[in-house]
Amino acid sequence: GQNIDQPTEMTATEGAIVQINCTYQTSGFNGLFWYQQHAGEAPTFLSYNVLDGLEEKGRFSSFLSRSKGYSYLLLKELQMKDSASYLCAVMDSNYQLIWGAGTKLIIKP
Amino acid sequence: GAVVSQHPSWVICKSGTSVKIECRSLDFQATTMFWYRQFPKQSLMLMATSNEGSKATYEQGVEKDKFLINHASLTLSTLTVTSAHPEDSSFYICSARGAGAAETQYFGPGTRLLVL
């Protein structure tokens, strides 16, 4: 079966760095997406990785290792507004998005 | 770019009535649109996938006669919840994707449905 695993909840301190991991087992791979979802709102697109390596976009970076079925989202200089759920999603061989359950990130002052 | 709108953002209706939710891609042509449902503190659940001009593909367990989807143009898809009941109360979110199958899905802001 297809499976996406990510931690349920993480806590970090304002100003610090946090890494949210995502491991996946899917039938085929056409890219991995990270979305941010604030409570009560719809998801917003953060990043897309299809090749191995690190993609940096401001305070957020996303890493992919296809051979390991592994990705992480790195958030630097954490701000209180970064408190949200972070969703990992993998596009399989049929171009269907397989969603992880999301990681709730709590930022403390 | 890549803006998706949804209307209405909130709906409160009586049990037994039908509710229509619109999803529009404002600055790109959405070959494919997706409808999701999310219950409080739960994951996104894909309900159906619709391609412009063809019938929607529903996920297992989603009643196609209850959740009618129309994707009549490259910028508009509608979801109609027919004969809504309290258990249909949820957060309904659409997303849209351009012509390439591997393109990013962009989400609308969602519609909160409360059925009394």
Image (spheres, rainbow, N blue to C red):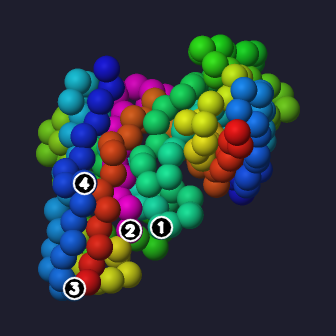
Q: Is residue B85 left or right of residue B104?
A: left
Task: Looking at the image, tell me whether mark 2 or mark 4 is earlier in sequence order.
Answer: 4
Q: CA distance from mark 2 to mark 4?
A: 12 Å
x, y percentage for residue A92?
60, 40
* Mark identifier at residue B9: 4
Q: Chain of mark 1?
A: B
Task: Looking at the image, tell me whether mark 4 or mark 1 is earlier in sequence order.
Answer: 4
Answer yes or no: do the residues labelled 3 and 2 have beta carbons within 8 Å? Answer: no
- The image quarter containing residue A8 is bottom right
**Residue B33 vs residue A101, the one in the foreground:** A101
Answer yes or no: do the residues labelled 1 and 2 have beta carbons within 8 Å? Answer: yes
* Mark identifier at residue A44: none
Local crowd size for mark 3, using a 10 Å CA cut-off: few (<14), some (14–19), many (≥20): some
Q: How many marks?
A: 4
Q: From the image, tell me which residue sits under label 3.
A: B15
Which span is picked out in magenta? B90-103
Judging from the image, what secondary structure is the residue with disc 2 in? Answer: strand
Question: In the displayed image of the protein, which residue is found farthest to the right?
Answer: A68
Judging from the image, what secondary structure is the residue with disc 3 in? Answer: loop
Q: Is B91 in the magenta?
A: yes
Q: Quadrant of the C terminus of chain B?
A: bottom left
x, y percentage for residue A5?
75, 50
- Tell me the kind of residue under disc 1: Phe
Q: Is residue A49 left or right of residue B50?
A: right
- Residue drawn at 24 percent across, 60 percent down: B10
Q: From the image, tell me which residue sits under label 2.
A: B90
Q: CA distance from mark 4 to mark 3?
A: 19 Å
Local crowd size for mark 1, using a 10 Å CA cut-off: few (<14), some (14–19), many (≥20): few
x, y percentage for residue B83?
20, 81
Q: Is A91 in the magenta?
A: no
- The image quarter containing residue B73 is top left
